[in-house]
Amino acid sequence: DAGITQSPRHKVTETGTPVTLRCHQTENHRYMYWYRQDPGHGLRLIHYSYGVKDTDKGEVSDGYSVSRSKTEDFLLTLESATSSQTSVYFCAISDLGQGFLEHNEQFFGPGTRLTVL
Amino acid sequence: AQSVTQLDSHVSVSEGTPVLLRCNYSSSYSPSLFWYVQHPNKGLQLLLKYTSAATLVKGINGFEAEFKKSETSFHLTKPSAHMSDAAEYFCVVISTTSGTYKYIFGTGTRLKVLA
């Protein structure tokens, strides 16, 4: 298995509190992603990073911010958690392939189950 | 932009019978396509990937998928279902927009295997 860990694995918090989720990789992959998974929606991209300090928004980025100060760590922060952010959050990593403009598959972490009361 | 559509949200098969999970894609050029499996309360695991080398792709656990450009399809099959195949399956395409790359997920197909 690819070396990806997420912490915490479970968290219950209250509306309005800040929350930070951590993703740590030992694969030295360039790209890192944060997704949320909700029933009927598959996985939706929140933010991604294409290098240290290089990040961009995904399709559901409102209410979330990210930071990547080291290759191996990608943090997701909910500035003020809301009940609509109750979800399972997955981190993923990927890297460039051998061919021109080729991207390899993503590898996923085990997920963090977040409940906002 | 590229996209994928998984045609069935739920599929039920009997153990020992064939599995077919359908995925259609939309892409203006030859895409990179993937199938992932997610068992309950687990992360996603790569089953197989297509990157234009061969149209019939073999993956883990006896799964395979065939890339059909004329039908814009990448259906996942397995000759004989096993109880352990019960899971959710996701078809994924890489989307490129203005030089950036994103993985676009289908909404998933939940496979149920009946004893």
Image (cartoon, coloured by chain):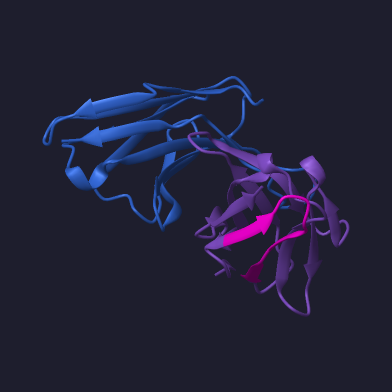
Chain colours: A blue, B purple
Span colored in magenta: B11-25
Dominant SS in magenta: strand
Q: Give coordinates of residue B35: x percent, y percent.
A: 67, 52
Residue A101 or B48: which is nearer the viewer? B48
Q: Residue A18: percent from the left, percent from the top?
A: 18, 29
Tell me the residue at 67%/25% (across/down): A1
Q: Is residue B68 left or right of residue A65?
A: right
On screen, residue B28 above or below B41: below
Which residue is nearer to you in this view: A58 or B91? B91
For residue A82, what is the image quadrant? top left
Quarter of the image with the C terminus of chain A is top left
Residue sitting at x 30%, y 33%: A114
Image location of residue A86, percent across then percent down = 27, 41
Q: Residue at x 67, y 44 (%)?
A: B85
Q: Is residue A116 above or below residue A43?
A: above
Observer-nearest residue: A59 or B14? Answer: B14
